[in-house]
Amino acid sequence: MRYLIIPRVDLAALEFGGVAPQPALRTRMREKLHEFRVSHDQAHSTIKNAIERETRRLKSAGAQRILRVLASPERQMISTGITVIEADETSASNLGDELTEAVLVQDDSMNLIAPLPASGDIAAAQPTVGDGETLWHLRQIGLEAARKAGFAGTGHGVTAAVLDTGVADVPELADRVVDAQELDLDGWRTRKLDQTKDTHGHGTMVAGLIAGRTVGVAPGASLVNVIMLPGSYGTLSGYVLALEWVASQTNISVVNISAGQSGFHPNMQIMTEVLRRVHVLTVSAIGNEGKDETRSPGNYPNVISVGACNSSGGVWSRSGGGNVILEGLTVTAPKLVAPGEAVTTCTKSGEFAAWSGTSLAAPIVTGLACLLLERWPDMTLAQLEAELLDHAESLDLPKDRQGAGRVMLSPKLLS
């Protein structure tokens, strides 16, 4: 069985302050992290010693069981600080008893936040920007009017990673996908694909709302396809590997995640710090289970969690939200909402259809982040989050339903 050994506190998170996410700086950050892991990471040293003792015990007992380290902070897991092992239950239990500065977690599922088809509301075959009914999501966030008034922002020069089921090669996304990777969990590596693909269809819908030619918020942004949910099914270890790979790529500025585990999981919290540490914005769907239900990592304060609103100025009935107790403090999710009920996007087949879900609201926020970073590439992560949250339009609903309100195009982009 596969297990993750997660430090209770990762001091490497204290290494860097609020600076702009420039590639050269991120390279230096990773170099410093590697130095920390090798020379100063006390938690990792304790974990490594515990693994070595258990390995010796197995050998001295002549046991046939194998304790194998798949990845360690010294090499593959520089950013996360997580150790990944394969072990039987006995060895895992022995290790768990020894670990004082870390927690051992069995690998678990982390699957797609699946949207629903919008009943009786299938989009036209060739929607246009001027079609207010089909593309209401662009109108509601202020983008349609801005474009008519001359706004020319497209997200050009900004790269967003889509951690999903894949992204198909369809006309709506022609030339948008600049890299495609799939996960090899047994070999603990990512494998570059010769051609982008979608193993399910969901990732293509998400990508369309970020960078689609007609339905997208940022049609000039570049996309990186990371197949984290093959066939819509993923794992916690796959999530960690995807995060680690993204953190090593200096060109990625925003990450879109439409997957999660139901409820609050303290052991996932340190994982959500990884991309923030290298100043990459994480945008995550909050889930489709309705009021008082949330998904991790969407309910952590260090990501932009997104719920779904509708064309009538309300929140979709199945959009998640609620209050989470985190280290004695009450945290409310989602942070904001975006159009997500009966939203038109492209499909894996190259056609268009309307679907509903918070996983379709999240990429609209990701697209707006790309527009902001195109205009202000030196913007810090804190400034980027503030621009998204401060200009949200209240729907006059409780905070646990709407967060700050419906995300809107920043008026600063029009000046």
Image: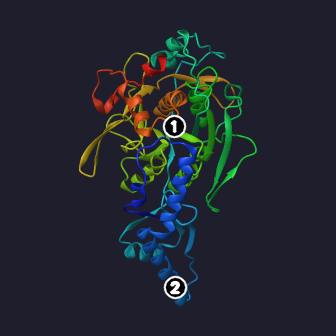
**Marks 2, 1: nearer the viewer:** 2
Residue 305 position, x and y percent, is 41, 37
Look at the numbered disc 2 and give the secondary structure of its residue.
Answer: helix
Residue 381 seen: yes
Q: Residue at x 62, y 36 (%)?
A: 223
Q: Is residue 176 above or below residue 265?
A: above
Q: Which mark is residue 369?
A: none
**Along the line of sight, which residue is nearer the eye, 300 or 159?**
159
Q: How many marks?
A: 2
Label 2 is placed on what type of residue? Arg
Label 1 is placed on what type of residue? Ala
Disc 2 designates what residue?
56
Disc 1 designates what residue?
114
Q: Residue at x 41, y 70 (%)?
A: 42
Residues at discs 2 and 1 in contact (Cβ within 8 Å): no
Left or right, residue 58 beside residue 198: left
**Along the line of sight, which residue is nearer the eye, 2 or 405?**
405
Residue 205 position, x and y percent, is 59, 31
Identity of the residue furthest to the left in this view: 328
Q: Residue at x 55, y 29 (%)?
A: 374
CA gap between label 2 and label 1 equals 45 Å
Q: Say few, some or many: other residues with alpha carbon within 10 Å of mark 1 (under 14 / 14 to 19 / 20 or more).
A: some
Q: Is residue 379 above or below residue 88?
A: above
